[in-house]
Amino acid sequence: NAGVTQTPKFQVLKTGQSMTLQCAQDMNHNSMYWYRQDPGMGLRLIYYSASEGTTDKGEVPNGYNVSRLNKREFSLRLESAAPSQTSVYFCASSRLAHDSNQPQHFGDGTRLSIL
Amino acid sequence: GENVEQHPSTLSVQEGDSAVIKCTYSDSASNYFPWYKQELGKRPQLIIDIRSNVGEKKDQRIAVTLNKTAKHFSLHITETQPEDSAVYFCAARDVNTDKLIFGTGTRLQVFP
């Protein structure tokens, strides 16, 4: 039981390049999330998926797209990377049950630098 | 929507002392308040959470208190140890969107 697995762990891109960050969970969770973490800003939600087949924008969605491929996998895509997207990206998942307030479990993060 | 403020941003204590981190939230309908600990270069990990039907919860040296009237909740760490050094995040569940809204974090340093 690996929990939440993110790939890659590190990546350097040039401005304008595209890439996809991968996330998979093996806890049979319904909900999955993508956050970015910048110094002094805490964790800010980019996109989330409440269940398979649905995605919704979070606090900072501009410049990103997501795909909920199946119940296990939730990918984040940068179509044209910009230096402002240099950050640490965390994927998280939770067992969503209405009003049950389940905690979120995080992956190890992807450290992305855009030059 | 929900807004969470966290104070202080940095906190330094001597080993064995207590540490208190405070958060306030804006939406009185919020009903779930987790705390996460993030060590340098690691993932955030849940350390304790509290639901709105209780006022206090304790787990060994860690406790969380919730004041729904004042809309604030606090993390208390007693008998601090150097391994408690980390960044701590509070969060509140936005009942309208079902999303967690995080505070900006508190960097706790425990000096031996």
Image (cartoon, grey):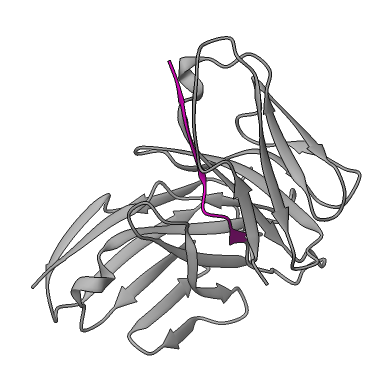
**Residue A111 forms part of the magenta stretch:** yes
- In percent of the image, x 63 and y 62: which residue is there? A104
- In percent of the image, x 50 and y 81: which residue is there? B55
Instruction: Please name the predominant secondary structure of the magenta segment in the image.
Output: strand
- In percent of the image, x 35 and y 39: which residue is there? A40
Residue B16 or A82: which is nearer the viewer? Answer: A82
Q: Quadrant of residue B76?
A: bottom left
Q: Residue B11, can we see it?
A: yes
Residue B92 in the image: state x and y as whole percent.
56, 58
Residue B18 in the image: state x and y as whole percent.
20, 77
The relative height of residue A15 versus residue B32 in the rendered view (above or below) is: above
Extreme residue in the top direction: A16
- In percent of the image, x 73 and y 39: which residue is there? A75
**Residue B79 forms part of the magenta stretch:** no
Is the C terminus of chain B in the top left, top right, bottom left or bottom right quadrant? bottom left
Residue span colored magenta: A105-115
Residue A92 in the image: state x and y as whole percent.
63, 54
Q: Residue B70, can we see it?
A: no
